[in-house]
Amino acid sequence: MSEQKLRIGFIGTGVMGGPIAGHLVKAGHSVTVYNRTRSKAEDWARSHGGTAVATPADAARDADAVLSCVGNDDDLAQVTLGRDGAFKAMRRGALFIDHTTVSARIARQLSVEAETLGLLSVDAPVSGGESGAQAGTLSIMCGGTKTAFAAAEPVMRAYAGRIVHIGGAGAGQTTKMVNQIAIAGVLQGLSEALRFAQASDLDTDKVFEAVSGGAAASWQMLNRWGTMAKGEFDFGFAVDWMRKDLGLALEEARMNGASTPVAALVDQFYADVQAMGHGRRDTSVLVERLPK
């Protein structure tokens, strides 16, 4: 699929999907949106000049490409394979790109369903959070055939800073699990390091200046150390979603035999954070579990 202007159906105009769909409009594509909460789709359409419709099938009908960014496996199954699902309305040869973080199992299932219907399908979870979606700099890890990826890549360039084809169906989702496992360990280490610095009566700004240019540096340190030190967490990627993602990763690890003790431990720490009432706050709120 070339970089011509396309008719695109977009399913899910939430924190991530809304900005992604907006970048597609800016790239010159014609975008029709569906959201489970109809008012959100209508608000998005008024703001961006797109069209809001009542069902996923309505968004998919006559589209060159359909993109989704919803909540979980059940949500994705409903909007694709349900009674008013997108797959029933898509024409043969059309492209399906899913940006939801879900299990590799459903990604593989949708790939099989798509192939049966003559569709191209790519599982393409993203990393970069709300800020990356708004800036159009998301990192996208993709699973699917080379043909499907070749069709999807030009579309995704409108909102991505990095796009990598990992392998066959489900490979994008399992790579996102790698991403979340790595983040979990880094955030726990960062939380402990910050509390250690505070307990030592160090100036945390100067500590950051000293260590952020060396081997301790990470995206989390560069972007979250300062807000963690100030106790600011009302933004970013929610703890509730991180627990969902870690649950997917730990389930996959049980199936493939990988050992993930740190991820399992941090998942339980996040359960503590949820019990503290921080489920909708940024994942860096993990530090609040540690005494000051």
Image (cartoon, rainbow, N blue to C red):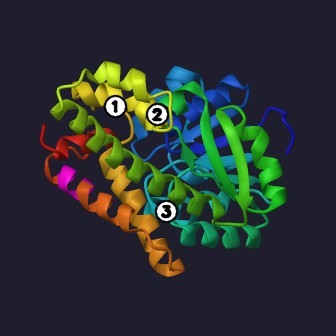
* Total numbered badges shown on the rendered structure: 3
Q: Earlier in the sequence, mark 3 or mark 2?
A: 3
Whole-Å distance between the Cαs marked 2 and 1? 8 Å
Q: In which quarter of the image is residue 160?
A: top right
Amino acid found under the numbered disc labelled 3: Gln
Mark number displayed over residue 223:
none
Quadrant (top left/top right/bottom left/bottom right) for the C terminus: top left
Q: Mark yes or no: residue 124 visible.
A: yes
- Of tags 3 and 2, the one toward the viewer is 2
Residue at x 67%, y 57% (from the top left corner)? 89
Left or right, 161 with respect to 245, comes to right
**In magenta segment, residue 271:** yes
Above/below status of 206 relative to 50: above
Q: Label 3, on which residue? A: 78
| Magenta stretch, overall SS | helix
Q: Which of marks 1 and 3 is nearer the N terminus?
A: 3
Residue 32 in percent (x, y) is at 61, 37
* Labels 2 and 1 touching (C-beta < 8 A): yes
Whole-Å distance between the Cαs marked 3 and 2? 24 Å
**In magenta segment, residue 3:** no
Residue at x 51%, y 66% (from the top left corner)? 103
- Point out the stretch of residues depicted in magenta: 270-274
Residue 93 in percent (x, y) is at 82, 57
Residue 239 in percent (x, y) is at 31, 47
Whole-Å distance between the Cαs marked 1 and 3? 28 Å
Mark number displayed over residue 130:
2
Residue 118 in percent (x, y) is at 79, 66
Q: Mark yes or no: residue 51 visible.
A: no
- Badge 2: residue crowd in 10 Å (few <14, some 14–19, many ≥20): many
Mark number displayed over residue 235:
1
